[in-house]
Amino acid sequence: PWMFELRGEDAIDVYCDLDKRLPHTDPFDRQITIGFGCMLGLFEIAAAEAGYAVEADIFPDGEPQPRLDKRRVARLRLVAEGEVARTPLFEEILNRRSSKEPYDTSRPVSAGTVERFSRGGRALI
């Protein structure tokens, strides 16, 4: 549901395709906004693979309320840096699958796993 407009040599404006919103199942645009965050994460992984960092200015024209509108969702700028941290996640992007099975809540999560995930962000990579 995202539209990209190239700006100059290193910038991209991102807009929401308003016709792709789902007002009956996502009346406050929460899910589509979460999807934007996922897309941005994948964009950063792919840019790093090509040797670029990404500077993201989210809602540069102001945060839309109560729903997304015609304004930019983000301005992304690709920055060529000498040493960009690459991640092994790039190789797995096309292998991702969402599990639709119920979780087995009878099996406890190990303390080590909880600790790793509690660090959050890039510390997991």
Image (tube, helix red, strand yellow):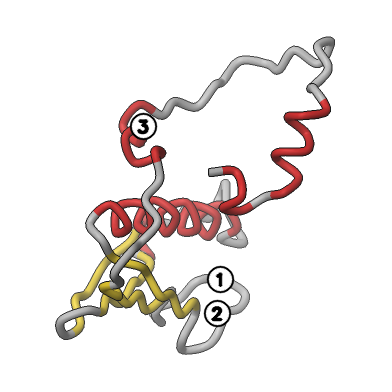
Residue under numbered circle 1: 67
Identify residue type, mark 1.
Arg
Do residues under tags 1 and 2 come within 8 Å of each other at their CB atoms? yes
Q: Amino acid at mark 3?
A: Glu
Q: Is 111 placed above or below 82 here?
A: above
**Is 8 displayed left or right of 102 in the figure?**
left
User: What residue is rendered at 33% in x and 61% in y?
Assistant: 2
Q: Residues within 10 Å of mark 1 (few under 14, many from 20)?
A: some
Q: Is residue 1 left or right of residue 22?
A: left
Which of labels 1 and 3 is toward the front?
A: 3
Which residue sits at x=77%, y=29%? 112
SS for callout 3: helix
Query: Percent from the top left, x then y, of residue 32?
Result: 50, 55
Residue 92, horizontal then vertical, whole percent: 36, 32
The numbered mark, 3 or 2, whose residue comes first in the sequence reads: 2
- Which residue is labeled 2 in the image? 64
Circle 3 Cα neighbour tier, 10 Å, few/some/many (<14 / 14–19 / ≥20) = few
Instruction: Tell me if mark 2 has few (under 14), some (14-19) or many (20+) residues whose alpha carbon lies within 10 angstroms of its own.
Output: few
Instruction: Please give the residue where the numbered disc 3 appears in the rendered image.
Output: 92
Which residue ends up furthest to the front in the rendered image?
82
Q: Which badge, 1 or 3, is on the more N-terminal residue?
A: 1
How many marks the image carries: the answer is 3
C-alpha gap between disc 3 and disc 2? 34 Å
